[in-house]
Amino acid sequence: MDKWMKNNNFNKILALAFAIILWIIVHVDTAPANQTTVNMESKTIENVKIEDTGFNEDKYVITSRDAESVRLEVMGKKSDLTYKFSDAYKVWIDLSNVQPGDTTLPLHYSLPSGVMLDDIIPNEVNVHVELRNTKSFPISIITKGEPAAGYQVGTPVIEPAVEAKVTLGTSELRKVAKVQGTIELNGDSETIKEKKLKLYAYDSGGNEIKDAVIEPSFVTVELPITLPFKSLPLDVSFSGQLPGGVALSKVTPEQDTVTVYGTEESLASLSSYEATLNLGSIDSAGTKELKLELTVPEGAAKIEPAVLNVSVVTSDIAEKTIDNIPVKLEGVDTGLTALIKDPASKTVSLTVSGAPNLLEQIDKNNISVVADVVGLTAGSHEVTLHVSLPRFIALGNASQRLRATVELNAPATPAAAETPDNSSTGTVTSEPSAEPVSGEESPTEPVQSGDNALPTATPSPSEGAVDNSGTASANGATNNGSSGGT
């Protein structure tokens, strides 16, 4: 070692090494201060959204504010400004102590590490707060577009509710006029089922109120789209034979109307639907369920239902005699008077047959006996009496011919009398009286004649009659199971 220390060349090299080390130490110490000053830069962050904290949304609603976002002017190292994402810059207002009305609040912010705020524009926000209110509105459904040609749109069925609750600030809630959903149509020919139809609140001008909170916000809607249809009363007539000694007591279809689908033209002429029930399967008195098949009317497309269940009640036949049934005159021509000569009492007695429960309800007020003289001239005439009975009731002796003698008279012509000269006195000659001659029966008011065939329609008994309206032949369902239902 001493040898090296005594060598001049070694000492020169060592001195040079120390000099280099000292130079490096001096320059490294001064570099950071100079570098910091050189790399500081500024940056503008646009449209930083203002967030809300501490707001009681169950009690209040913000109806307006004068700013939704701010602009930030920041400074920092280039590396910090370049590699920090925009969502690292946060701005918010504290609404925990806000009250209804206008309030100006300062803005709070959070910046990435190494970044300093130079300016925030704006630096405060004015908000208008109102109490939150709720009101119920009926839900309406509208359609846009058209169904398939010839089809029509029915009434929408809404689930789970027909009303919706709208929650808004007091002033905005007053603007709500309706809650509505819209179904788009594009030539549809089948019922539409919207499982999730969104609802919107609108003002009276049809403008959407965007901040409205609607409950429920979605509903399920079934919108019928069908051909034109018509609901028709169901009339039941009968075919087949009942066993001897058995009469119809009650016929009850499970529904008394049917729906027929078709074009407007095919439906125009339809006023009722007549179906024929076959009684041939009934072999004894009692209650039986029968199937009534409905056929589509000519020109129509569909009928619903296609099959009906009908409850048929039959009973052992019974008879009842009803006295003092008045005979009514119909069809007396104008200018004639009519008088029933035979029977002199102007009444008849009839024996009728049917189910016991129906016979119990019948009296002379339920039976119509008519002497029809339409088209007959003055003189004495023997006419057939037309008997109308309640449905399922028949004459006990259907073959008997009921007749009456009716006398038709023309009004008497007054005798000619010398007409005095009234020119000087001004006396007016009296006209003949329009009243009938004493002892002469008053003319019968002409009544529009019904069908001349036995019988015509009369009201059904109040209890035990067939549920749908109709008429029955006097020789009809109670004896042989047939009925002329209309």
Image (tube, rainbow, N blue to C red):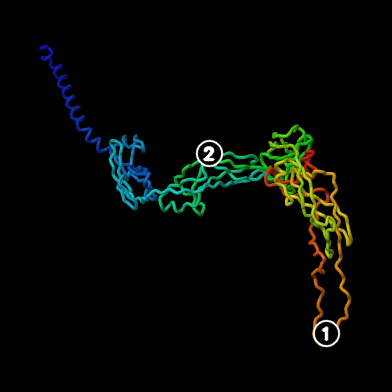
Where in the figure is residue 254, as x and y percent of width and height?
66, 39
- For marks 1 and 2, the one nearer the N-term is 2
Dot 1 alpha-carbon crowd within 10 angstroms: few under 14, some 14 to 19, many 20 or more: few
Q: Which quadrant would residue 226 be assigned to in this image?
A: top right
At x 81%, y 76%, the residue is: 431
Can residue 117 be seen here? The reply is yes
Mark seen at residue 196: 2
At x 68%, y 39%, the residue is: 253
Amino acid beneath label 2: Lys
Mark seen at residue 287: none
Q: Nearer the viewer, residue 311 or 381?
A: 381
Where in the figure is residue 79, as x and y percent of width and height?
31, 34
Q: Is residue 399 left or right of residue 120?
A: right
Dot 2 alpha-carbon crowd within 10 angstroms: few under 14, some 14 to 19, many 20 or more: few
Q: Secondary structure at mark 2?
A: strand
Where in the figure is residue 374, as x and y percent of width and height?
84, 57
Residue behind mark 1: 422
Q: Nearer the viewer, residue 96 or 277?
A: 277
Where in the figure is residue 42, as x and y percent of width and height?
31, 41
- Relative to 77, residue 269 above or below: below
